[in-house]
Image (spheres, rainbow, N blue to C red):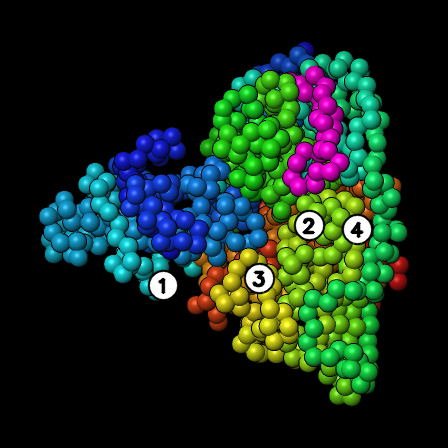
């Protein structure tokens, strides 16, 4: 059995400890904000926080979360008003929206670790997240805006 | 024109989830207003479309009948209706229509197929009429309640006012009196606003789904659930039209959570692929991880079938040879042969654009319960009614036996107009007797997709002693997407010719021949954002740039001279009696060289074209008409000594005629430029022994923030805003790659004639 907290709620997982966190959270807990995009940690759509750090949950076994705090997009802010989420809306970032949970979780972790990132640090910090609608310049601007608030 | 009806008392509304006291619908018979009116007279056999409902609390619910895949349709189309209705946008909610073209296709043109950049241009007029009709009914209802003449009542921002007495009502306060008010038609039909009175159309509006999309609350096909549902993944033949010879599921069935392994029968050899399920071995179970693990443990022997010889090395050479050979002349102006004989200088070049795959961030996913009637389909589809049609065929049922609920689409780009994945889910649901959600992986999406057609282009031009082009000869060869229906086809289809080839806009060239060579279809070829326009814009814009150099002329001036400033280019003058014009009348959306030149001049001015640039910098321009819009792109590139490059700025001028949401236009052009950057820089699908070589984002790299242009400036051209709206979702893609390649030439003197650019600058 693996015990962890997900969005502040204690959870016990009894299945295959190699199951990626993404599928436990999506299929068993029904939290579908974290998305499947590649299954190889190449696109970032599945990004969650484990003890505050961004992880690609599609390749992170549930076992890794033992005793840790997992945060998904649903738990980032109770009202959906984390500074990054507000900046996303202020810059009208989303197109299809599918990658944006992962983008927001990457940006929040980036700003948590580095509240005043340079332009290059924003770019390298967000380069692991793909958006095929091509919202990058708005994401870039939104991260800059959010950085002024955190 | 639609006949708007007050349908507040109709029973079917209850099933549709619309519980408003006032409900308006539009009865539309495609192409026949008269028939609709007659049907009304004999008891209304035509089902009215449900389009707006106003509840007692004043909330206005507007139906969105188009699929949202990021193009902003759930914002833009309802904006039109809300504007004419005089609704307050903050009190509008959007209801997503399921697939049913008899109820939810107010324009009567597209059967709800969200494809071809058509939504705004086909819905501006009808949504305005519906909004104006709603405003009329509300005004009449208020007048009735006050006992005054309706001419004294007007609607403004969700309220109704009686000027003389100073009284007013909220919209919600009059709906009880509105249910029986008929909407007049013809000359006394409710008047539309003058464009100067619009309060939403033409103004920036943020996306209606932004909150859900920024909080994890947005639901896509992959998120759909039905109680008792199973999850499935499918192992598919690596080669197009290959089949399962035998398989061993012993180890797969031993995986915890795997319940069944079943074979989806291969499509019969004589059946065209269309959008059917192609067959394979499905692993069905309780969760996604288990079925993925199970699939990894399957042992399958494949019969590779007839396309095992499809190998990019030889196939690409065959396309190049076909482009040299030609054979099918599709447009012929003047006498190209004589012009070449008389030319002072003849220039030739060959261009190549490979296969691409869509890679929407959400791989295909569909949930189907085939064990209920109607069959229930929940999926991220661009085309819910074709989904119903093909699911019905998969199950041996009628289309009317199938209902299709449309979720948000995690990207579409043409992939999700082809519902093979829903067919798989339907077949599996029937086989296992439970609802089944089929989940495609990224590898599935890249290896078993519908590919953007690879193509080769042989370009030849003659010029006189003054450097003026006297002859232009373009021969293209590609496997046709019509191969989905006619596998033996060897030539392109009228639709592909119409995608920026037969309408080559170099109207000032006196002798011009467009030709098509033959190619075999050996893979599922399908449409991809902007389709064949990509290669046509690439070949002609790059070649025009080469000719300018050969003539010793400025490339933008030279391109402007090729295009000219004619009001209209009529292909009838070149012996083409009819041609495909994005499914629309050429009279409504003519080909207008002056708008192309205007867009090019606009972007040249905005981008600072003509100023001197530092060493290693280059500015390149390209312009292309597609989906009736005129788009010119200027790319500023910096090429480093090691051959790597970055794009610090992009300027795009788009003339899309009348537009609805300028913020939506900007976002589409920003995104299309990034999509074009992948096309130009890294997109490439190859095959070996018939199988696609690439599998995920490591070997099919797409543009990331680290190599994306982050300063894309969109300039919406206003000069022709009084003309009909044109497409916006796709037309930003085609001019990007040639603009970038022309910029690289400007910076380095090196010509790129084959996409993607990849490492070609590094090997120099």
Quadrant showing the C terminus of chain A = top right
Q: Is residue B531 magenta?
A: no
Inter-mark Cα distance, 4 to 1: 51 Å
Q: Is residue B263 magenta?
A: yes
The residue wearing badge 3 is B581
Q: Nearer the viewer, residue A3 or B486?
A: B486
Inter-mark Cα distance, 4 to 3: 26 Å
Q: Nearer the viewer, mark 1 or mark 3?
A: 3
**Residue shown at the point (27%, 35%) measured from the top left:** B9
The residue wearing badge 1 is B195
Which tag, 4 or 2, sits closer to the chain's start?
2
Q: Nearer the viewer, mark 4 or mark 1?
A: 4
The image quarter containing residue B448 is top right
The image quarter containing residue B636 is bottom right
Q: Is residue A84 left or right of residue B11?
A: right
Image vertical order of residue B177 relative to residue B225, above or below: below
Q: Is residue B748 visible?
A: no
Inter-mark Cα distance, 1 to 2: 41 Å
The residue wearing badge 4 is B520
Q: Is residue B504 left or right of residue B584?
A: right
**Residue shown at the point (51%, 63%) measured from the top left:** B585
Inter-mark Cα distance, 4 to 2: 11 Å
Q: Is residue B500 left or right of residue B744?
A: left
Give, as a single range, the part of the protein colored magenta.
Answer: B260-287
Q: Nearer the viewer, residue B480 or B540?
A: B480
């Amino acid at each position: 059995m693996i015990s962890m907290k997900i969005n502040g709620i204690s959870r016990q997982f009894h299945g295959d400890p190699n199951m990626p966190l993404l599928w436990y959270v999506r299929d068993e807990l029904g939290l579908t904000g974290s998305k499947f995009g590649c299954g190889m940690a190449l696109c970032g759509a599945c990004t969650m926080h484990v003890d505050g750090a961004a992880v690609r949950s599609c390749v992170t076994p549930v076992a890794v979360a033992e005793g840790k705090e997992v945060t998904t997009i649903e738990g980032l802010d109770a009202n959906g008003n984390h500074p990054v989420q507000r900046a996303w809306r202020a810059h009208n970032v989303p197109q299809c929206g599918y990658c944006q949970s992962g983008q927001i979780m990457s940006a929040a972790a980036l700003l948590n670790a580095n509240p005043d990132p340079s332009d290059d640090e924003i770019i390298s910090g967000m380069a692991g997240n793909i958006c095929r609608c091509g919202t990058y310049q708005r994401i870039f601007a939104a991260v800059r805006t959010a950085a002024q608030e955190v | 024109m639609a006949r708007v009806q007050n349908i507040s008392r109709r029973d079917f509304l209850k099933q549709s989830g619309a519980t408003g006291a006032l409900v308006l619908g539009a009865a539309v018979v495609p192409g026949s207003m008269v028939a609709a009116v007659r049907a009304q007279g004999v008891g209304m056999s035509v089902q009215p479309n449900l389009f707006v409902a106003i509840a007692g609390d004043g909330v206005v619910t507007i139906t969105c009948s188009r699929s949202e895949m990021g193009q902003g349709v759930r914002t833009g189309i309802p904006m039109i209706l809300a504007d004419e209705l005089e609704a307050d946008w903050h009190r509008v909610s959007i209801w997503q229509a399921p697939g049913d073209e008899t109820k939810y296709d107010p324009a009567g043109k597209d059967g709800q197929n969200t494809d071809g950049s058509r939504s705004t241009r086909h819905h501006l007029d009808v949504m305005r009429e519906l909004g104006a009709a709603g405003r009329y009914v509300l005004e009449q209802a208020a007048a009735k309640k006050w006992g005054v003449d309706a001419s004294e009542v007007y609607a403004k921002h969700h309220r109704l006012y009686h000027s003389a007495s100073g009284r007013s009502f909220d919209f919600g306060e009059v709906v009880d009196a509105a249910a029986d008010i008929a909407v007049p038609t013809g000359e006394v039909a409710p008047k539309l606003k003058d464009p100067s009175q619009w309060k939403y159309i033409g103004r920036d509006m943020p996306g209606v789904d932004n909150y859900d999309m920024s909080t994890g609350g947005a639901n896509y096909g992959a998120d759909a659930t039905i109680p008792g549902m199973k999850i499935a993944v499918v192992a598919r033949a690596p080669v197009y039209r290959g089949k399962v010879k035998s398989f061993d599921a012993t180890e797969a069935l031993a995986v915890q959570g795997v319940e069944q392994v079943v074979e989806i029968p291969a499509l019969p050899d004589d059946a065209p692929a269309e959008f059917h399920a192609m067959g394979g071995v499905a692993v069905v179970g309780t969760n996604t991880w288990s079925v993925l693990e199970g699939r990894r443990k399957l042992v399958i022997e494949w019969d590779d079938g007839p396309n095992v010889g499809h190998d990019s090395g030889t196939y690409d050479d065959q396309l190049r040879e076909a482009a040299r050979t030609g054979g099918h002349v599709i447009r012929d102006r003047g006498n190209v042969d004589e012009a070449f004989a008389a030319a002072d200088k003849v220039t030739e070049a060959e261009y190549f654009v490979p296969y691409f795959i869509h890679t929407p961030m959400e791989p295909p996913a569909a949930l189907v319960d085939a064990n209920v009637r109607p069959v229930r389909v929940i999926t991220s589809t661009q085309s819910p009614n074709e989904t119903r049609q093909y699911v019905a065929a998969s199950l041996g049922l009628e289309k009317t036996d199938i209902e299709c609920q449309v979720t948000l689409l995690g990207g579409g780009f043409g992939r999700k107009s082809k519902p093979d994945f829903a067919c798989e889910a339907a077949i599996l649901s029937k086989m296992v007797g439970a609802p089944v959600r089929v989940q495609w992986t990224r590898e599935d999406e890249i290896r078993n997709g519908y590919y953007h057609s690879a193509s080769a282009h042989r370009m030849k031009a003659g010029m006189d002693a003054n450097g003026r082009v006297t002859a232009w000869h373009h021969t293209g060869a590609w496997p046709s997407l019509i191969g989905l229906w006619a596998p033996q086809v060897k030539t392109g289809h009228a639709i592909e010719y119409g995608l920026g080839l037969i309408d080559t806009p170099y109207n000032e060239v006196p002798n011009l021949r467009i030709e098509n060579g033959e190619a075999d279809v050996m893979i599922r070829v399908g449409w991809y954002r902007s389709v064949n326009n990509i290669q046509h814009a690439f070949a002609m814009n790059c070649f025009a740039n080469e000719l300018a150099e050969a003539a010793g002329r400025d490339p933008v001036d030279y391109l402007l001279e090729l295009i000219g400033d004619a009001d209209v280019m009529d292909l009838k003058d070149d012996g083409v009696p009819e041609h495909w014009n994005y499914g629309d009348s050429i009279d409504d959306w003519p080909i207008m060289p002056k708008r192309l030149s205007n867009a090019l001049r606009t972007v040249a001015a905005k981008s600072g074209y003509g100023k001197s640039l530092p060493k290693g910098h280059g500015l390149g321009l390209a312009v292309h008409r597609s989906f009736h819009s005129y788009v010119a792109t200027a790319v500023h590139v910096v090429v480093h000594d090691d051959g790597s490059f970055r794009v610090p700025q992009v300027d795009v001028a788009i003339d899309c005629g009348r537009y609805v949401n300028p913020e939506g236009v900007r976002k589409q052009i920003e995104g299309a430029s990034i999509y074009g950057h992948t096309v130009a820089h890294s997109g490439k699908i190859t095959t070996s022994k018939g199988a696609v070589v690439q599998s995920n984002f490591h070997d099919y790299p797409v543009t990331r923030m680290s190599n994306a242009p982050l300063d894309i400036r969109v300039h919406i051209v206003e000069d022709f805003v009084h003309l009909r709206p044109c497409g916006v979702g796709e037309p930003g893609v085609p001019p990007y790659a040639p603009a970038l390649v022309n910029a690289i030439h400007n910076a380095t003197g090196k010509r790129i004639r084959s996409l993607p650019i990849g490492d070609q600058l590094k090997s120099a």
